[in-house]
Image (spheres, grey):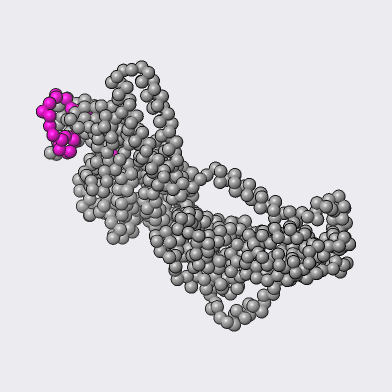
Amino acid sequence: MEMSQYLEVFIEESKEHLQACNEHLLELEKDPENLQIVNEIFRAAHTLKGMSATMGYEDLASLTHQMENVLDAIRNKKIVFSPEILDVIFLAVDDLDAMVESIASGGDGKRNVEEVVEKLVQIEKGIPLNQKNTAEAEVAVAATEKAPSRENQYDQFETTVLQQSADQGFFTYEIDITLKSDCLLKAARVYMIFEAFETLGEVVKSIPPVEELEEEKFDYDFMVTLISKEAANTVEAAIMKVSEVEKVEVREFFANSQSVKEIEPSVIASSIVETEQEETITSVSENVAPTENKQAEKQTTTKVSNKTIRVNIERLDILMNLFEELVIDRGRLEQISSTLKDQELHETVERMSRITGDLQNIILTMRMVPVETVFNRFPRMVRQLARDLNKKIDLQIVGAETELDRTVIDEIGDPLVHLIRNALDHGVETPEVRRANNKNEEGTVVLRAYHSGNHVFIELEDDGAGINKEKVLSKAINKGIVSKETAKTLTDSQIAELIFASGFSTADQISDISGRGVGLDVVKNTIESLGGSITIESEEGKGSLFSIQLPLTLSIISVMLVEIQAEKYAIPLSSIIETAIVNKKDVMHAHNQTVIDFRGKVVPLLFLKDIFDVPSTGVESDYYSVVIVRKGDKLAGLVVDGFIGQQEVVLKSLGTYLSSAYAISGATILGDGQVALIMDCNALIK
């Protein structure tokens, strides 16, 4: 079988199962008595093991198998769960994650995991982790382990069924079945064995019970009691035909009173009363159970799989590109319609615009991904950081279901990691300091996401020390980021935003400024490159709130089309405050810069004709057409030659060759076939 075609699905699903393991392990840490959580982790590990073995990644399958053994021992209460065991399982998950990443990047998925495997084996055998895994310890443990009893005992009803079957000429067989030790899908083999039993006769009993066999709660051997008219060698041959069965022992059994299990008389009485009414149904109930359960599982799976489908993101990108071409043609048709002034054409184009608008919403929604895919990795990271820093942190995630465009999701992970690290390291105080300040010794960090208009807001809030503005200002002056004169005029929010300046590098000791936000200039640049913004609210001693504003999508945007001489440019509406016509007489000069008085604020003018070196057509006017744009608290007036109007356009990349073009974020094709460059207002204001 050609495996390469399944590699992408394997990698994707492996990451999902490992993420599930991480999430459930964190839950288990809070609720160690909840065996349901252990079962969930076991299922994820078991599925990963089967997938890995099928794809031929034996190292991955082997490590997962060792982890699975420990989880199985925990859920069967053979070993007591402890924080030390959790740490070892986390290490195993980390190694598995690294192996999957190796496979994803074209590697062979091999990794030296001897140390983790040794610890898992110690846990499985009950040897304390701080004790060497010596031969003596193994012998001692082996001596105390006793194989579970396979002695079969039957209740009154089962004995009656066996005796009546014997009277009717049926043989009763007790069959010991042993699967091969390298069998990975034990439940599947059990199902196949029981299907073989259906053709041979009726199953009366199994040890362990059918439910445990289906859930793989057994080692590699189990016992089944079968009623059949077939000879013993025929039964043995039928079972041996099932692959991965190592050994089958068939022995004839004769029911008598001694084989009845000792149970309370009242229980026997009630059992007999019930079975008199349902004798025929009950005698085959256990035999039917596996089939019914499997059918129920299949139905459930079908229902779920009908709701979602895994689609390669490249196909969605192709679909998006085709639709973008449709948007361009729609603009062209609208232009032709307005030129020809034909009523029927106008109505048809209007209807087409409405339909393509609906189609646009559906396609953009298809590209949306919950921020949960990014947020999910943070609880584990916070747990580890808190332990490293000897702090107690409660991470709360709100609004993880909020959706963002995939291209935005791909970019925001690293900035959020940086912000969370800063919140933990330099925001939240140590338990001793918090107690001294009459705070709960456990710090709270809230990661919140929500929609507002055409934007998504992601907020990171902590109840830590906040930003020490005096120290930040002092540091900024020493670094030459601001002058002493400018420093006196800065507001509290402007002082807080100084931590985003590139002068605050990670090479400096953050403790010098009650350290908040060293190296955060990278965070700010990344957010702004996505067309977003970041703001800070902080109160010293109370905590800080970092708020990130991001556009829902980066593919189709609303712009204001403007003319600069004979050329057309597009300015994103998200950056525009308003447009204005300014008389040239009202223009002033200050600090070698042309400015205007805009609603009581001094706003610098940027002449785009000069910035973009647009050839002049020689037509002059007594008025300037100005577009007022904003970046954070900063304003600027972009001087253009005329306003064309608002339009939805497709943002196309300029490609790698022109990626360094100043203040241009991309281009779009207009309805008349012209190309309009899309301005990057953030770069212009900077």
Q: Is residue 624 magenta?
A: yes
At x 42% / y 36%, what residue is drawn? 452
Quarter of the image for residue 38 reads: bottom right
Residue 235 point in image, percent of width and height = 74, 66
Q: Is residue 169 magenta?
A: no
Q: Depth check: 166 or 410 in front? A: 166
At x 49% / y 65%, what residue is drawn? 57
Residue 465 seen by the camera: no
Quarter of the image for residue 613 reads: top left
At x 31% / y 44%, what residue is drawn? 528
In the orientation shown, which residue stands out farthest toward the left?
618
Q: Depth check: 544 or 569 in front? A: 569
Residue 488 point in image, percent of width and height = 24, 44
At x 17% / y 38%, what residue is drawn? 612
Q: Quadrant of the C terminus?
A: top left
The boundaries of the magenta stretch are 605-632
